Image (cartoon, rainbow, N blue to C red):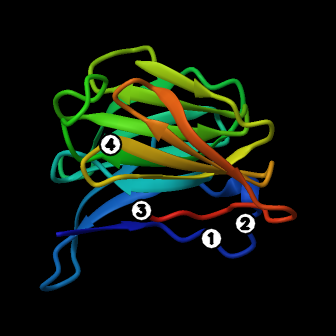
């Protein structure tokens, strides 16, 4: 099985494009499950493999972060809490920190200059990481889930200790906007 996003129809504008999740059989390519994505007509800005097999977490201009189980063809949870578009989201793959104990922890980066930690089954953010001066445009997490790094249009990188949800380090690179990160 695999998952594929649908392609926009010919002549569609950016506002017309949504996401349709499709589970396809790799042997014959037949679509076995299909469902409309959690962001309606909004484009997903980021998608990451979830903590559990068959789950994906996505974020969008609609200010939400959503967890979808594409194998079951359903939306598991939608989080609201950012005041502006959500640019990126990552799944934390470990239970190494106090804030991330157990599976189902996600970190989102937003145009509202914050990052938020979300826990599966909880409606509100576990923590809000603040400090960037402009849009947070990139985020990556350590494989053990203990740290994350964020990049912003304010030309800074910030290293976060996810055990304490505190800023561990900051660096500024003159005239460079950070748009992509990988741990």
Q: Is mark 2 on a helix, strand or loop?
A: loop
Is the N terminus in the top left, top right, bottom left or bottom right quadrant?
bottom left
> Gap between marks 4 and 1, in whole Å?
23 Å
Quarter assignment of residue 85:
top right
Q: Mark 4 points at which residue?
A: 68
Relative height, residue 48 to residue 58 (above, below): below
Residue 183, label in figure: 3
Asked whether, in this view, residue 77 is left or right of residue 10, the answer is left
**Quadrant in which the C terminus is drawn:** bottom left
- Residue name at image x 64 percent, y 45 percent: 170
Q: How many marks?
A: 4
Q: Name the residue under label 2.
A: 12
Determine the CA span between mark 2 and mark 4: 25 Å
Q: Is residue 8 left or right of residue 22?
A: right
Kindly report the distance in space between the C-alpha atoms of the residues bearing marks 3 and 1. Answer: 35 Å
Q: Which residue lies furthest to the right in this view?
A: 175
Residue 116 against residue 5 in the figure, above or below: above
Please report the residue visible at 45 percent of the width from the left and 26 percent of the height from the top.
Answer: 165
**CA–CA distance in space, label 3 to label 4:** 24 Å
Question: Residue 75, how many percent across, how many down?
Answer: 33, 36
Q: Earlier in the sequence, mark 2 or mark 3?
A: 2
């Amino acid at each position: 099985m695999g998952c594929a996003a649908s392609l926009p129809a010919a002549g569609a504008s950016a506002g017309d494009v949504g996401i349709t999740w499709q589970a396809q059989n790799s042997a014959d390519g037949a679509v076995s499950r299909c469902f409309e994505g959690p962001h309606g007509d909004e484009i997903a800005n980021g998608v990451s493999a979830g903590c559990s097999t068959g789950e994906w977490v996505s974020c969008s201009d609609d200010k939400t972060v959503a967890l979808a189980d594409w194998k079951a063809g359903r939306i598991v949870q939608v989080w609201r809490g950012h005041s502006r578009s959500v640019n990126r989201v990552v799944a934390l793959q470990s239970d190494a920190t106090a804030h991330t104990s157990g599976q189902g922890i996600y970190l989102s980066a937003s145009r509202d200059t914050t990052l938020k930690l979300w826990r599966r089954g909880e409606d509100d953010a576990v923590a809000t990481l603040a400090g960037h001066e402009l849009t947070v445009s990139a985020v990556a997490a350590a494989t053990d889930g203990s740290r994350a790094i964020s990049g912003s249009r304010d030309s800074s990188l910030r290293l976060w200790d996810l055990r304490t949800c505190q800023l561990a380090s900051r660096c500024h690179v003159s005239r460079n906007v950070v748009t992509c990160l990988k741990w």
